Amino acid sequence: MPSARLATAWALFQGLLIEALPFLLIGVLISAAARWFAPGGQWLQRLPSHPVLGPLSGAALGFALPACECGNVPVARQLLVGGAPLGTALGFLFAAPVLNPIVLASTWAAFPNQPWLLLARPLGAVLVAVGLALLLRLVPEAELLQGDLLAERRLALPLSEVSLLERRSGVLGGGGLAGRLSAPAGPARPALAELCRHGGNEFLNLALLLALGCLLAALVQTFLPRSWLLAVGSAPTLSILALMLLALVVSVCSSVDAFLALSFAAQVTPGALLAFLLLGPVIDLKLVGLLGLLLRPRGLLLTVAGAGLLVLLIGQWINLWRL
């Protein structure tokens, strides 16, 4: 019945949105706190820019932040705006949703009798994050990052890395860039009212995109039953591809995806189970709009393709080891 399917889609939409909104709020609050306590972001520029150490240091930041993939987007944006190395911000964006304490604890609670999974999931997340960071580093920042984000980022970067013209700010006049460069004082801490207004606008904009993503995920889930994907659960390669597609469709937050995976863990191969737990925190239907605030379409396509290939290879290796 069409009415029954619409009711199912509405229930799924509500569940996904209610599940994700608190973590999005946490991410916005963390981003606002960073602007308040470190308005200039000088410490971000001291993070390692090494192609491998950079993403690893960004991933390590995830241990201290209890936000899932939705909440990590505003934090990663603040890292980029503050002048953090690109690889470090990308490492945080892609690995932190798995490495944060809530996700690690939920994975342990769901699979206490599978120690290999408790080790393979965080290690796999780090490998995927480093691989994606290396891949996206091949694209110039001007072609990778959205224009408004790139303009804010250039204002924070030192002159040794970006020219005056690239900052897109006036050089003449005391209130322009020249005045700020010559001022001996550090960056001013934003007023509390400005901070609240900026955070509120950011939350509303991200929440709207999140709601659209949740609606899309709910509709796809309603008209693409999971049983179709789980039917190939015993095939070594098809099971991985099916569970990767399922991760894209169900769009559940990384803080609870382990409990969802527990419901069908006995029906799929070990590599497929790990693939489900690795791909969802990087990219799913509800995340596309949020990531679109950071990355241009080319960057989004590279992220989807790179993450899919890396997760498929990791899943295949796990099947060779565990089967």
Image: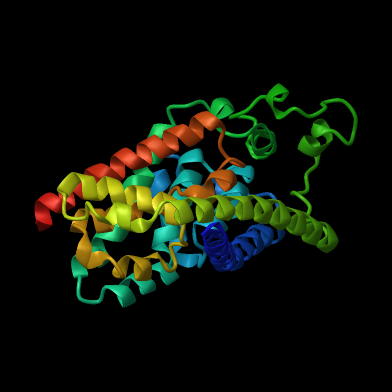
Dividing the picture into quarters, in which one does residue 309 lie?
Answer: top left
Dividing the picture into quarters, in which one does residue 255 lie?
Answer: bottom left
- Rendered view: 59 above or below 88: below
Front residue of 135/234: it is 234
Q: Residue 64: x and y, percent? A: 48, 66
Q: Residue 297: x and y, percent? A: 54, 31
Q: Quadrant of the C terminus?
A: bottom left
The count of marks equals 0
Q: Residue 210: x and y, percent? A: 61, 54
Front residue of 55/216: it is 216
- Rendered view: 205 above or below 183: below
Residue pictured at 66% horizontal, 31% vertical: 147
Instruction: Let me know if residue 234 appears in the view.
Output: yes
The way the protein has been coloured in the rendering is: rainbow
Residue pictured at 62% horizontal, 34% vertical: 146
Residue pictured at 60% horizontal, 42% vertical: 83
- Rendered view: 27 above or below 286: below
Q: Quick check: 103 left or right of 198?
A: left
Front residue of 175/25: it is 25
Q: Quick check: 262 left or right of 38?
A: left
Q: Residue 311: x and y, percent? A: 29, 46
- Rendered view: 4 above or below 134: below
